Image (cartoon, rainbow, N blue to C red):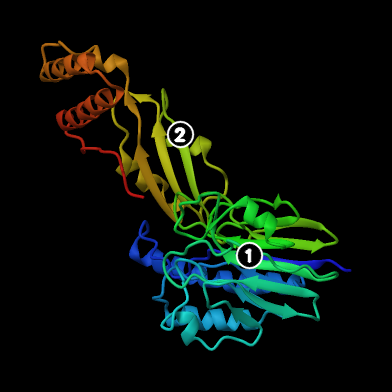
Amino acid sequence: MSKLKILHSADLHLDSPFEGLTAGKAAIRRGEQRQLLSALSGLARDEKADIVLLSGDLLDSGNTYRETGDELVRCLGQIDAPVFISPGNHDYYSAQCPYARLKLPENVHIFTRPEIELVELPKLGVRVYGAAFTDKYSGPLLRGFKAERQEGVLNLLCIHGELGSGDSSYNPITEQELRDSGMDYVALGHIHKASGLQRAGASWYSWPGCPEGRGFDETGEKTVNLLELGDGECSLETRSIAQRRYELLKVDVTGSDALLAVHTQLPDETVRDIYRIILTGETEQSPDLKQLEAALSQMFFQLQLRDETRLRRSVWERSGDDTLRGLFLEKLKKKYDSAKTETERIAIEQAARWGLAALDNGEEVAKHEDQ
C-alpha cells in the first residue's frame, strides 16, 4: 500500500485582535493572517497532499470578518484533496457560527457534533473520524471510543483537545485513550507549541502548534505538519508558512552603551518581526527607553522595550553626601539594607531610579508590563 500524504494544521486563530499592536498594525496582521489560508492551500497542492486535517481554532471567535469567510471558502476550494475541520473552543460549532453560514466547497467536511463521527474515503483507503466542540468547553470526547480495524484501511482522527490533564475543560485526552482508539494517526489541535511526532501504542499523534505567532508567548518559528503514513510507519516534516515572528531578546547592558549593546546582539533580519527587547544588567542610571525606541523602531515591524536593569552598588556609595542626591540615597539605602526579601529590594531600587531621574530632570522610567 502506498503511503498517505497528510497536511495537518490547527490554531490559525484568524481575526485575532492583536491587542499588543497599534490599531493600524493589528489590521495589517489580520490581513496577513488570511494569507495563511492561501499559503496552506498552495502547500497542499505543491506537496500533493492526499488529505488535509484542520484540528480546530481556525477562527479566533464567532465574530469573523466577511473577507475572512470569503478567503476561507476560496482557499479551501483550491485544495485538490478532501479537507476535514474539527471545530475547537474558539470556533465551536453552532447554528449561528461562521461555518454554518458559509457555503463551503464540496471537498470540505466539518464535524458538527460532540460525538465521534465517521467519514469513509474508500478511494483513498481511509476512514476519517472527528468531533466538534459545540461550546467554549468540552468534556472528554474519546472516552470509551474504539474504532474498528480493517486490513488495508487507515484510521485517522481529527480533533481538538488537551492531553494528560484529566480536569481540563477542553476535551481531556489520556495516553491510554489514544492507545485504545484504533487510530493510525490522531491530528490534534489546541496546544500552540508543536509537539513533534508522538506515539501511544500503535497510534501516532501530534499537535502542529499555531502556524504563526500572535504574541510573546508564541515566539520563534511556527510551522505546519506534513506526514507520510502507512505500513505501520509514520514520518513528519514541518513547513513554515508564516510571514512574521515574535521574538524576545535579553540584552545585558552592564558596562556598555545600551544602543551599542542592542545592535551587537541583534540578528541581521528583523524588519518583518515583532520584538520585545529586555535590557538587563547593572547601570549607573536608567536607560532612556524613548531615545532607544527612536533609534531602533525602524528595524522592526513593531518594537517593545522593557527595562529590567538594576542600579550599580556604586550608586549607593553616594549616599550620605551633603547633597540632596546624597540625602535621598541615604534614606533609601537604609530601607534597602533592612529589606527582608528580594522583592522589597527590587522595589526600593526602582524607587531610586524614579527619584534620580527626577533629580536629574530626566523622564521617569518604569517597567513596561504590556503583553
Nearest the viewer among 185 and 181 is: 181
**C-alpha separation, residue under disc 2 versus residue under disc 1:** 51 Å
- Residue placed under numbered mark 2 in the picture: 251
Kindly give the residue lying farthest to the right in the view shown.
1
Position of residue 138 measured from the top left corner of the image (x, y, whole percent): 46, 64
Residue 161 in which image quadrant: bottom right
Residue 81 visible at all = no
Residue 160 visible at all = yes
Position of residue 123 measured from the top left corner of the image (x, y, whole percent): 81, 81
- Which label lies toward us, 2 or 1? 1
Label whose residue precedes the other's in the sequence (2 or 1): 1
Position of residue 335 measured from the top left corner of the image (x, y, whole percent): 17, 18
- Identify the element where label 1 is drawn: loop
Residue 273 is labelled as: none
Residue 187 in which image quadrant: bottom right
Q: Residues within 10 Å of mark 1 (few under 14, many from 20)?
A: some
Amino acid type assigned to the residue bearing label 2 in the image? Val
Q: How many numbered callouts?
A: 2
Position of residue 139 measured from the top left corner of the image (x, y, whole percent): 48, 62
Taking 230 as reference, is 93 above or below it?
Answer: below
Residue 352 in which image quadrant: top left
Taking 40 as reference, is 361 above or below it?
Answer: above
- Residue placed under numbered mark 1 in the picture: 145
Left or right of 48 in this view: 96: left
Amino acid type assigned to the residue bearing label 1 in the image? Phe
Residue at image coords 61%, 57%: 207
Left or right of 221 in this view: 308: left
- Identify the element where label 2 is drawn: strand
Residue at image coords 39%, 76%: 63
Taking 80 as reference, is 343 above or below it?
Answer: above
